[in-house]
Image (tube, helix red, strand yellow):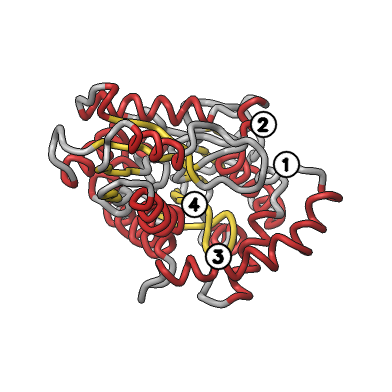
Amino acid sequence: MTLAATPIKLAAIFCHETFNMPAKTAVLLTNLGTPDNLELGSVKRFLREFLSDPLVVRLPRLLWLPLLHGIILPLRSPKTLQAYSRVWSEDGSPLLAYANKQRAALQEILREQAQVELAMRYGNPSFISVLRLLRDAGVDKLIVLPLYPQYSVTTTATSYKHLLGSLKQLDYAPTIEFIGYYPEHPAYIAALAEAIREHRKPGERHLLMSFHGLPQANVDRGDPYQRQCEQSAGKLAEALGLEPTDWSLGYQSRFGKQTWIQPYTSDVLKGLVARGINTVDVVCPGFSADCLETLDEIKVEYRHEFLQIGGEDLDYIPALNDRAAHIEMMRQLVAPYLSVSS
């Protein structure tokens, strides 16, 4: 996959006949995914699909798959189910609930310009089911927006690969615009800054920007994720007018024993207490919607850890979710690739 700050146009790969009629366009929002329901089997299926992805866990299959099925899934699935039970609502999984709201809100803005659909990389709604729907509806131009502001092989690239595989399986060949990343997009930074200002008073409390972690080996192989996280954090601090001592950056959600990119969020929190900083606001700029990693890992687990080591209060600032400024950002990202006549 070629990295680009602008969408990747695949017309050269997916050629189709050009007729004297306007293209029927769809915008496809994508995110990671979630279990279908609060049942052990559903959680286990989701984890199996996720952790079986060779772009997520880059270990030899002969070594990893027996370990995954024999040890990881039996041990991790019940714990993950418990965590989901703490964040599940009447609307179901928070990630899917917010993603559906994002889709509906963007559809309202785009109206007749494009059909807006949602597909999850793992779980449902699946790429296959949604692409089949678009194929049968006669869509011949597809704008794909993975809701990962920072590019990583483990998120954006696997979505791209899965998209191509699904299209091939369906014998479906639309023209594709793939928006790879947007870590410094002005509308993204502005939406984050607006959300943070609404949540906290200027000059009060330390701001910790916590991003999802990534194995250090991925970065060593050239994954630009950490660099883009740092770019986003720097731009956001600048937009908020923060001094270097007013904010910190950390990486959460480690898995396994290998070294992950640092500093770890848990270590940052310990360091803040050691500096006498006892009140912290945490924002997670890399998450486009609240999910298990924000609502449970940050809001529950890290808050408890912070209080245990001497902190007085840790407050989580919600993700952008379906905020109007976030939906406007999506509109700006896809707008250049919408046909005037569509």
Mark 1 to mark 4 CA distance (whole Å): 20 Å
Q: Nearer the viewer's eye, disc 1 or disc 2?
A: 2
Quarter location, residue 153: top right
Mark 3 to mark 2 CA distance (whole Å): 25 Å
User: Given the image, on which type of amino acid does mark 4 rest?
Assistant: Asn
Q: 192 above or below 124?
A: above
Q: Are marks 1 and 2 in contact (CB under 8 Å)?
A: yes
Q: Which residue is mark 1?
A: 58
The structure residue drawn at horizontal position 31% and vertical position 48%, both measured from the top left corner, is 320
Mark 1 to mark 2 CA distance (whole Å): 9 Å
Q: Which residue is mark 2?
A: 217
Mark 1 or 2, nearer chain start: 1
Residue 117 image point, x, y percent: 45, 57
Mark 1 or 4, nearer chain start: 4
Q: Nearer the viewer's eye, disc 4 or disc 2?
A: 2
Q: Name the side, left or right, on which 53 lies relative to 94.
A: right
Mark 3 to mark 1 CA distance (whole Å): 22 Å
Mark 4 to mark 2 CA distance (whole Å): 23 Å
Q: Is residue 19 visible?
A: yes
The structure residue drawn at horizontal position 64% and vertical position 40%, both measured from the top left corner, is 14
Q: Are marks 3 and 4 in contact (CB under 8 Å)?
A: no
User: Given the image, on which type of amino acid does mark 3 rest?
Assistant: Thr
Residue 340 image point, x, y percent: 35, 39
Q: Are marks 4 and 2 in contact (CB under 8 Å)?
A: no
Name the mark on residue 31: 4
Mark 4 or 2, nearer chain start: 4
Badge 1, how many Cα within 10 Å: few under 14, some, many 20+? some
Give the secondary structure at mark 3: helix
Q: Are marks 3 and 2 in contact (CB under 8 Å)?
A: no
Q: Which residue is mark 3?
A: 80
User: Given the image, on which type of amino acid does mark 1 rest?
Assistant: Arg
Give the secondary structure at mark 1: loop
